[in-house]
């Protein structure tokens, strides 16, 4: 039996910035919902279910903060639940919305959320609390030094240099300068990145994502509903999750499954999504990619996990412009997570941006001729991964 | 009902009261999952995906699904988390099986009691500017709802006491060794109407008809219908004497299960009796008994375990109150009743059962789940 497809019919996202004094947390959610519903040319009355995208409550400072977002997404007396897989939450929410439709339960589903990372005080203080209270919090671990350790291991294994990392930032800032919704849009040079303040060696300030505020929303619908209502859509053809161990110490072996240089479970999640989408050669079959990489070094192993090149090849190809807009496979043409990170919706923006690309609606950062793309989200301590293939 | 595949519950583990300090939370999760797998005669290798539900503030972790992935078998596996409610993990797992893209799903939820004050944790759920300084925890919200209902229904306090007595009696039958500690009084809710929070965990396994047939599994609770809905987040925006979200959720579930006379459709019901007032409100919203009949039907013993419609033969939340996972416990209790595996509190000849799950301030989130013994969509 041929599976009925699930389509994306509406997208809304804020112009992300460090601070939004003009909007409360629910206001930001509402902002994205209004944009997405207008894009879908539907009213909230037609939405049958809502998947709320919110990662740690502590970032908003309100327990179960999704409850305060109920009216922002128009959910009173409707199906409503919240997803949290850390940084992957946004794509996990799109995936969960997909299953509301793919199961046959709903024809039209909205997924939405927002974050005010720029206004949470210090996100690293919050993120330290994701680790085990007895053994790891006191170190003190944060997401920056966690992935700095990954960078050190990648350097040793594949010969990556700090300059290689800087090229990722330069590329993504160039892309972000073309995207009006990106947070960091200022062009920078390799020298700028290398001379920026060291945060956790080898990660420097400009190798890091910003703390962003803003919202995102997407509307999904069944193929039958889309056809009957003559709506425009792009299609989710592959999706998956996969997780690694919680314990960082268990990822510091040299086996394939436990090497902190690579992203084993992320690769498995891509493989599963590709299998579902019938893709057997991503290097030639993927036109564009939006890969969750909050630090410059993590874009390398994300590209490799997406099978867009071999292990250890990504630094050289980035330097050659292979993953630039205009290159063979543009990676993060929106500027990516490195230029915008409102954590609760960052991974949703990855899926939304791929959808816009294959729709041919990405504006100034459009990848020419893109018809099939892939998105990913990373959550927890680089632990829980979601992937999605989207096609025109 | 338009589900691509009809999910069936094939394994359950209910641990509504875990006492002692000899097992860590990770070990409690592991133990619970192993019990559910054993009940289904499966191993973790048979599990395609996992949905967990926990509360970060209860667990004292910023993203509690992270720590869970190992103990529940999530490493190198598809794992998802619904921190809004334990019952929402069931909903997501059922949707994934219903899509036909997964053969099996493991659903797990837990609720520890190690935080210094659950009440303070719950108060963090209020907006920080206007309401957090009020003493508004979940019990206070229930009390506001109870007071509103008492003003609307004459003689309600006595009916609520009868409901609590029923559930206590059921609890003595279902868990004779359990002596729940009386709850905290908050007018008009008396201490005998609730019980103190305890540590608990629950797991169940869902599968497709094809997987169930392939494995020759016979004790199955087939999902006939499922609904879930929310009310407004701000309690001042709500009409507390009605459960509009539960009315919506039950309409979804009954439409899928083709139930048009719910008062006579079920052999057993489990309701999230956070207080006896919420149980009564659920009777009405679920179409089991309208408020003008509460006194007569409760007084006549209709909802006793030997009555015409047994409600909460497990003893309900009054007997075991693992706060965050009480909703998934109700769903799993009904699945076990339908499977004929409810143990001492099994009701005879259960063909069709209804589970009600609710959570949040004054039952903001509401869910209704219908299970049947026979495969096929009609209840």
Image (spheres, rainbow, N blue to C red):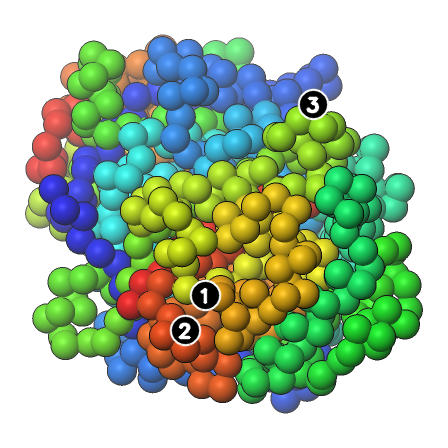
Side of B258 relative to B246 (left or right): left
Q: Which of marks 1 and 2 is nearer the N terminus?
A: 1
Q: Where is residue B291 in the image (x, y as percent from the top left)?
A: 26, 52
The subunit carrying tag 3 is B
Q: Which of marks 1 and 2 is in front?
A: 1
Give me the residue at 9% from left, 44% from top: B258
Whether B119 is drawn above or below B238: the answer is: above
Q: Where is residue B227 in the image (x, y as percent from the top left)?
A: 27, 49
Figure quadrant of residue A253: top right
Residues tagged by mark 1 and mark 2 found on one chain of the structure: yes
Residue A202's quadrant in the figure? Answer: bottom right
Which chain is indicated by disc 2? A
The residue that mark 3 highlights is B24
Answer with left or right where residue B271 lies relative to residue B203.
left
| Mark 3 residue crowding within 10 angstroms, few (<14) / some (14–19) / many (20+) | few
Could you tell whether A279 is left or right of B30 in the image? left
A22 vs A272, nearest the viewer: A272
Residue A263's disc number? none
Q: Residue A288, labelled with which disc?
A: 1
x and y percent of residue B105 in the render? 37, 32
- Mark 2 neighbour density, 10 Å: few (under 14) some (14–19) many (20 or more): many
Specify the label residue A357 is tagged with. 2
Assign a secondary structure to mark 3: loop
| Same-chain check, marks 1 and 3 | no
- Quote the CA–CA distance across marks 1 and 2: 8 Å
Q: Disc 2 on helix, strand or loop? A: helix
Question: Marks 1 and 2: CB-CB under 8 Å?
Answer: yes
- What subunit carries mark 1? A
Callout in the foreground (1, 3): 1
């Amino acid at each position: 039996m041929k599976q009925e497809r699930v389509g994306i019919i509406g997208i809304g996202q804020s112009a992300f910035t460090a601070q939004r004094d003009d909007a409360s947390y629910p206001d930001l959610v509402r902002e994205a919902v209004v944009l997405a519903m207008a894009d879908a040319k539907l009213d909230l009355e037609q939405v049958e279910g809502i998947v709320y995208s919110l990662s740690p409550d502590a970032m908003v400072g309100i327990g179960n903060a999704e409850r305060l977002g109920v009216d922002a997404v128009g959910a009173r007396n409707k199906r409503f639940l919240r997803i949290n897989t850390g940084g992957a939450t946004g794509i996990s929410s799109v995936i969960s919305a997909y299953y509301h439709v793919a199961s046959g339960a709903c024809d039209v589903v909205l997924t939405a959320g927002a974050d005010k990372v720029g206004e949470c005080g210090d996100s690293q203080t919050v993120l330290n609390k994701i680790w085990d209270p007895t053994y790891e919090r006191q170190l003190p671990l944060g997401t920056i030094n966690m992935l700095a350790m990954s960078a050190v291991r990648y350097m040793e294994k594949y010969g990556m240099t700090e300059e290689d990392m800087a090229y990722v930032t330069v590329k993504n800032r160039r892309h972000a300068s073309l995207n009006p919704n990106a947070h960091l849009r200022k062009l920078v040079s390799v020298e700028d990145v290398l001379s920026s303040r060291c945060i956790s060696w080898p990660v420097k300030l400009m190798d890091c994502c910003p703390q962003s505020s803003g919202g995102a929303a997407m509307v999904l619908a069944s193929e039958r509903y889309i056809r009957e209502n003559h709506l425009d859509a792009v299609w989710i053809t592959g999706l998956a999750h996969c997780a690694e161990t919680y314990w960082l110490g268990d990822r510091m072996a040299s086996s394939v499954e436990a090497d902190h240089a690579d992203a084993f479970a992320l690769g498995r999640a891509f493989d599963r999504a590709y299998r579902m989408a019938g893709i057997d050669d991503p290097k030639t079959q993927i036109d564009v990619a939006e890969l969750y990489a909050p630090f410059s070094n993590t874009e390398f192993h994300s590209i490799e996990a997406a099978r867009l090149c071999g292990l250890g090849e990504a630094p050289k190809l980035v330097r050659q412009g292979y993953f630039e807009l205009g290159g063979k496979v543009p990676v993060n043409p929106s500027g990516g997570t490195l230029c915008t990170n409102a954590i609760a919706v960052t991974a949703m923006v990855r899926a939304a941006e791929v959808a816009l690309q294959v729709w041919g609606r990405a504006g100034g950062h459009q990848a020419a001729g893109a018809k099939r793309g892939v998105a990913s989200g990373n959550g927890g301590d680089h632990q829980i991964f979601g992937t999605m293939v989207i096609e025109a | 009902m338009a589900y691509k595949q009809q999910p069936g519950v094939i394994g359950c583990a209910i641990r509504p009261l875990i006492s002692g300090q000899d097992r860590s939370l990770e070990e409690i999760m592991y133990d619970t999952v192993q019990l559910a797998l054993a009940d289904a005669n499966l191993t973790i290798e048979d599990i395609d995906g996992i949905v967990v539900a926990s509360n970060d503030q209860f667990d004292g972790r910023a993203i509690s699904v992270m720590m869970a992935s190992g103990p529940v078998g999530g490493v190198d596996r598809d794992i998802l988390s619904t921190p809004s409610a334990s019952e929402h993990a069931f909903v997501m797992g059922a949707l994934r099986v219903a899509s036909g893209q997964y053969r099996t799903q493991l659903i797990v939820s837990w609720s520890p009691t190690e935080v210094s004050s659950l009440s303070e944790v719950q108060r963090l759920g209020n907006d920080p500017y206007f309401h957090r300084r009020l003493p508004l925890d979940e019990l206070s919200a229930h009390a506001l709802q109870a007071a509103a209902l008492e003003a609307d229904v004459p003689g309600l306090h006595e009916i609520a006491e009868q409901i609590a007595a029923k559930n206590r009696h059921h609890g003595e039958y279902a868990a004779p060794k359990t002596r729940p500690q009386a709850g905290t009084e908050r007018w008009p809710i008396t201490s005998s109407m609730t019980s103190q929070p305890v540590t608990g965990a629950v797991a169940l396994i869902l599968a497709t008809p094809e997987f169930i047939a392939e494995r020759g599994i016979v004790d199955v609770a087939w999902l006939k219908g499922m609904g879930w809905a929310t009310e407004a987040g701000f309690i001042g925006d709500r009409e507390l004497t009605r459960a509009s979200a539960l009315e919506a959720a039950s309409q979804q579930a009954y439409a899928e299960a083709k139930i048009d006379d719910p008062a006579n459709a079920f052999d057993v019901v489990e309701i999230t009796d956070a207080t006896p007032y919420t149980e009564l409100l659920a009777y009405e919203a679920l179409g089991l008994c309208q408020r003008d009949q509460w006194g007569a039907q409760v007084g006549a013993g209709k909802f006793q375990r030997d009555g015409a419609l047994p409600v909460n033969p497990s003893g309900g939340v009054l007997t075991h109150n693992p706060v965050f996972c009480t909703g998934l416990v109700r769903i799993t209790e009904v699945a076990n009743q339908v499977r004929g595996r409810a143990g001492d509190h099994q009701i005879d000849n259960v063909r069709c059962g209804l589970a009600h799950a609710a959570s949040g301030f004054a039952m903001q989130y509401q869910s209704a789940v219908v299970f049947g013994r026979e495969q096929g969509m009609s209840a």
